[in-house]
Structure formats: C-alpha cells, structure tokens
C-alpha cells in the first residue's frame, strides 16, 4: 500500500510552484521578454565574490571537503555561528545546542518533530505565513492552526493570538521579516508575544516553544531593526537559513539553534538530533559548512531589493493599487482590486504577470510579488501592470 497522504502531497504542487512552472511554459509560447515572473523567492543578487572564491579554494585544497561531518554539524562552523550572533546581537548561543540543517525548511520540520508527541498537539502560526508550515506540522503529527493578523500593519492581533493558544499548543511559529508581507516584528511586538506566551505557559504548566523562522533576518530596509528573539523569550528555537541573505538557496545550508535558556534544553536538543536522525537529515552539506566557518558574517548586497521595492510601489500606487510597504525580506503584498485574489491572479496571468494569490498564506484578498528579480524585470513590467489596471478600470 502506497502512502495516500504522500501521493497527495507529491501530485499537487504549491500554488507558488504551479505558477512558476506555468511561467516556464508561457515563456516558450509568447517569449521570455513578455513574461514577468514574480513567483519564487529566489535571490537575484549574486553570492558575495569572496564566498565563491573561498568555496573554490576549499574544493581544491581541503582533502576532507566531501567527507561526512559530525551528525549535528562541524564544531568549527557551530562556533562561528555563536561568534557571529554574539558580535551582532550581544547574545551567546551555545555551539552544543546548534544543529546544522539543509536550510530553514529542514530546521522547521525538525523543530516540529522534536516537540510534537501526540495527535492532539498543535502548532500555531500567525498569518500571513509560509504555506509549507501546514505541511511540516501535519506530517509531524500535529494539528495546524493559525490566527489572523492585524491587517493595518500586518503584525499580531494580540487578543486573537492569546485566545488561540490552548493547552494543546506546543509551538508557535513566527516569521520576521515576514514572507509574504515584508512586515518586521519590532521590539514591542516581540515583548508582547513573549508576555502572552509566558502567561500561557504558567497557566498550562507546560513549555510553549516559540519557533523563529528567520531566513530574511539580514534583509532589512530604511534602518529597520530585527530583535534577536532569544533575548526576550527563553523557550525559543531559531530556524535560520543562508539561502536568502547570502544568495545560496541551492546549497541548502542553515541551522537550528535551541536557546541556552530554554526549559529542558538538553532533552530538547537530544530530540532535535533524534528528529534529524529519524528524518534522514544528518550531516548538512559539508562544503558550505566549511565555507561558513570563515563567512558566517557575510551578507549579499541588499540595495537591489530595496530599489525594486521602490520602483514597484511607486508605479503600482500611481495605478491605484494598495501596497503593504515592506520593511524587510523581498516581497510586496498588494491588495487585490477584486474580491477574489485567485481570480485576480488568473487575470494577471493573461498579461504575463505571475502574481501569487494570498489564500494559502492564511490571508484573503492579496497577491504576493517577489521583488528579488532583475531591475529590468521590475521596470519592464510596469506597462503591463498599467494595461491590467486600465482594463480593470482602476485608472
């Protein structure tokens, strides 16, 4: 008997991937210059040159480059991660509570698997959220719930958040800077989340782990700051990836870090290692573990993402689109001019504009535009947005 759940997952792509694949077909039909693919969060700026050069050096000079590392990752890279976070945020993680992973996705899946022990356990997300959270939670044996955000600023509706936490809530996952809205959880927001979780932990007598999904933590605009969450809430699990900030999505390198102040931290870390073992995730790619020993503090150029944000916001607002002004990440969340965002996305496709409808992110009535495209793509798309707006009688 083949696993029916896995058949369903494997035979139906996410809406993001469906649009991306549609775009490849459309480019062949009408020409690449007439298709504006804003679907994937695939960094458009190059990886820093020194990182590429160092990777080449490691390949040529390190005879152990293709060998296994320790299951939880090379000790030297884990120490480098501790140093970077200590230098930048003034907080000491513990190299013996860090687990190297194939990106943030693997870290999140491991985190969920580590804290879920019953089919009544719940993972709670705050909308808008990355749609794969649901897949990761449900395949870990948990129920997946989410709470709507405050759509004025796309931060947390605290009353709804507090009401949504139950005695079955084992983990809460947040994503800041946020995919898809670009909102950044400021210090006041993190403090309030922490206060609510502390209160609920005491009420239920069980730890509630805050899972911080942070692949965009370095991608910030206009002087925005991203609070380092373990400084505010002790039961934090960080899920980090170098895919976005270092433009390395295809190398699949990231880490999970258990806060040194977390309840049951030793057993939690043993559970992390056990989940990694059970899922077959031991030993993240050796080459880029070695690269990060020297380059854990590097970041790709951020300015092109801000430039594309400004180009698109300025153009779209002149066309009477309503945009959420992102403070980080590389997405633009735009209000659909018609009630059904899926229908609007389908209409936009006929103009060669590939925009991701927001329904699977837990928010209705918006589309996500990935601004991690070339400047040429951003600029050349504007006449097509203009035609779309005119035909919808927006201008």
Image: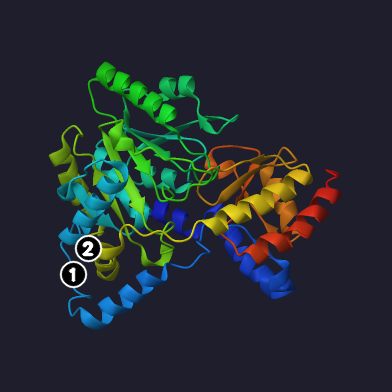
Q: Position of residue 130 (x, y in %)?
A: 48, 46
* Number of marks: 2
Q: Which quadrant holds residue 29? A: bottom right
Tell me if 378 is positioned left or right of 258 in this view. right
Secondary structure under tag 1 reads: loop
Q: Count residues near mark 1 (Cα–Cα under 10 Å), then give few for <14, some for 14-19, many for 20+.
A: some
**Quarter of the image with the N terminus in it:** bottom left
Residues marked 1 and 2 touching at CB (< 8 Å): yes
Q: Report if residue 140 is visible in the image.
A: no
Of callouts 1 and 2, the N-terminal one: 1
Residue on which disc 2 sits: 283
Q: Position of residue 341 (x, y in %)?
A: 67, 43
Q: Report if residue 220 is visible in the image.
A: yes
322 above or below 99?
above
Q: Position of residue 353 (x, y in %)?
A: 70, 58
Distance from Cα at disc 1 to Cα at disc 2 = 6 Å
Q: Position of residue 380 (x, y in %)?
A: 73, 63
Circle number at residue 68? 1
113 above or below 188?
below
110 above or below 228?
below
Tell me if 228 is positioned left or right of 188 in this view. left
Tell me if 328 is positioned left or right of 271 in this view. right
Asked which colour scheme the image uses, the reply is rainbow
Q: Residue at x 18, y 69 (%)?
A: 68
Secondary structure under tag 2 reads: loop
């Amino acid at each position: 008997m083949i696993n029916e759940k896995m058949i369903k997952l494997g035979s139906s792509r996410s809406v993001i991937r469906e649009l991306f694949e549609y775009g490849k077909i459309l480019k062949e039909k009408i020409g690449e210059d007439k298709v504006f693919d804003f679907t994937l969060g695939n960094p458009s700026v190059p990886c820093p040159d020194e990182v590429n050069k160092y990777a080449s050096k490691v390949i040529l000079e390190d005879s152990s480059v293709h060998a296994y590392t320790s299951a939880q990752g090379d000790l030297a890279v884990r120490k480098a991660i501790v140093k970077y976070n200590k230098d930048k945020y003034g907080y000491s993680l513990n190299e013996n509570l860090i687990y190297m992973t194939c990106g943030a996705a693997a870290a999140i899946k491991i985190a969920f698997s580590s804290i879920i022990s019953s089919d009544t356990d719940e993972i709670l997300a705050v909308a808008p959220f990355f749609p794969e959270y649901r897949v990761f939670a449900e395949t870990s044996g948990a129920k997946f719930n989410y709470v709507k955000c405050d759509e004025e600023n796309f931060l947390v509706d605290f009353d709804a958040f507090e009401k949504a936490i139950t005695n079955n809530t084992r983990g809460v996952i947040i994503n800041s800077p946020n995919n898809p809205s670009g909102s950044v959880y400021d210090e006041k927001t993190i403090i309030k989340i922490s206060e609510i979780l502390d209160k609920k932990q005491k009420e239920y007598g069980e730890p509630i782990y805050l899972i911080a999904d942070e692949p965009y933590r370095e991608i910030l605009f206009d002087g925005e700051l991203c609070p380092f969450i373990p400084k505010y809430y002790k039961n934090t699990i960080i899920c980090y990836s170098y895919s976005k900030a270092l433009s390395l999505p295809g190398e699949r390198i990231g880490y999970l870090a258990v806060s040194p102040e977390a309840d049951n931290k030793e057993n939690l870390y043993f559970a992390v290692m056990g989940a990694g073992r059970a899922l077959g995730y031991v030993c993240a790619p050796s080459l880029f573990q070695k690269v990060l020993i020297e380059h854990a503090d590097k970041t790709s150029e951020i300015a092109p993402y801000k430039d594309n944000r400004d180009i698109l916001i300025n153009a779209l607002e002149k066309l009477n689109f309503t945009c959420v002004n992102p403070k980080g990440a590389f997405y633009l969340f735009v209000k659909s001019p018609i009630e059904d965002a899926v229908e609007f996305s389908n209409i936009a496709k006929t103009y060669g504009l590939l925009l991701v409808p927001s329904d699977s992110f837990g928010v209705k009535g918006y589309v996500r535009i990935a601004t991690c495209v070339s400047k040429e793509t951003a600029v050349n798309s504007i006449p097509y947005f203009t035609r779309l707006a005119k035909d919808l009688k927006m201008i």
